[in-house]
Image (cartoon, rainbow, N blue to C red):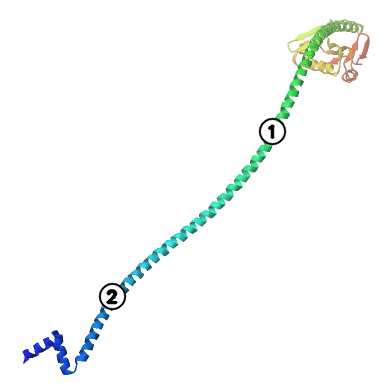
Amino acid sequence: MGSLKREFLELLEKDLEFRYAVAGYLGLSEILKRLDIIAEEQKNLRMEQASLREEQTKIWMEIVAIKEEQKSLREEQTKVWSEIASLREEQVKLRMEQTKIWMEIAAIKEEQKNLREEQTKIWGEIARIWEEIKALREEQVKLREDFNRMLVLIDRMDNRLSRVERTLEKLTIDVEDEAKSFLKHRLRELGISVELTSLILPDLELNIYGASEDVCVVGEATVRTGVGTLEELIGKFEKLRREYPERLRRRIILVIYASLPTAELVEEARSRGVWLLKATEEFHRPEKLFIEV
C-alpha cells in the first residue's frame, strides 16, 4: 500500500497527462490548467522581475556612475570657477599694471617733452654762449691790440719813470746835501756846533743824523712829504731809544727838512714839537727845540 502511494504521487508530480486525468476525474482539471497558466505567468513574472531588477541594478549603477560623474563635474566646475576667479584677479592685476605702465609711459613722454624743451633751451643757450665767445674773442683781439699799445705806452712810461726816478734820486741827494748844509748853518746860528751826516744801521736808516757833546740831531730830508714822514721819524727815534741808546744824547732835536710839506704835516709838526723847515722858509720851530731823554 505504501509503495502504491509513492508511485501515485510520483506520477502526479512527473506525469502531466496523468495529473490532468486525475484532476479531470476529480473535477479539478480546469483548475489545474489555470494554476499551471498562473504558475507559468508567475515564472515569467519572476523572470521579468529578475530582469527588471537587473535593469534597475544597471540603472542604479548608471545613477551612481552619473552621480560620481556629476560630483566629478562639480569638482571640475569648482576648479574651473576657481580658475576663472584667479584669472579674473590676474586680469584685474594686469589691468592695474597696464594702467601703471600707461601712466609711466605718459610720465616718460611728459619728461621727454620737458627734456626736449630743456634741450632746445640748452641749444639756444649754447648758441648764445658761442655768440658771446665770438664777441669775447673779438673783444680779446681788441684787448690784445690795446694791450700791445699799452705795452708800448708802458715802455715809454718806464723810460720816463726811469728818468723821473733818476731826477728824484738826484733831487733827494741834492735835498739831503742841502738839508745837512743848511741845518748845520742854522744850528751854528743857534750856538750848536754839530757835524751832520746819514746814519745807516742794519734795521734803520736816517738821512740826517749828528751827535756832539750832549746834543743829537735826528731828522729826515725829502722833497714833497706828508704826515707819514713825521710818523716814520718818530718811530725811528723810538727805535733808537730802545735798541741803540748809545747813538743818542741827553738833548734831542727832531727835524724834517721838506721842500713841499703838506698842510697836515705842518699842523702835526706843531702838535708833536718837530722842527719843520726848508732853505727859504721855516714852517715851524718849537719854542722848546730840545727833547730831554
Mark 1: secondary structure: helix
Q: Give the residue number, with chain letter if any, for mark 2.
A: 51
Q: Give the image location of residue 289, x and y in percent.
A: 89, 14
Crowd rating for badge 1 (residues with CA inside 10 Å; few <14, some 14–19, many 20+): few
Crowd rating for badge 2 (residues with CA inside 10 Å; few <14, some 14–19, many 20+): few
Q: Are marks 2 and 1 in contact (CB under 8 Å)?
A: no
Mark 2: secondary structure: helix
Q: Give the image location of residue 176, x and y in percent.
A: 84, 7
Question: Which residue is found at the position 49% from the left and 56% from the top?
Answer: 87
Tell me: 253 left or right of 148.
Answer: right
User: Of the residues tagged 2 and 1, which is closer to the observer?
Assistant: 2
Closest to the observer, 188 or 8: 8
Closest to the observer, 59 or 156: 59
Question: Which residue is found at the position 81% from the left and 17% from the top?
Answer: 232
Closest to the observer, 174 or 150: 150
Q: Kindly identify the amino acid type of the residue bearing the numbered disc 1.
A: Ile
Question: Which residue is found at the position 37% from the left and 66% from the top?
Answer: 68
Q: Is residue 51 above or below residue 166?
A: below
Q: Quadrant of residue 25?
A: bottom left
Q: Give the image location of residue 188, x and y in percent.
A: 90, 6
Sequence-first tag of 2 and 1: 2
Q: CA distance from mark 2 to mark 1?
A: 100 Å
Tell me: 91 left or right of 275.
Answer: left
Q: Quadrant of residue 54?
A: bottom left
Tell me: 67 left or right of 11.
Answer: right
Q: Which mark is residue 122?
A: 1
Q: Which mark is residue 65?
A: none
Q: Quadrant of residue 270?
A: top right
Q: Give the image location of residue 191, x and y in percent.
A: 90, 7
Q: Kindly identify the amino acid type of the residue bearing the numbered disc 2.
A: Ser
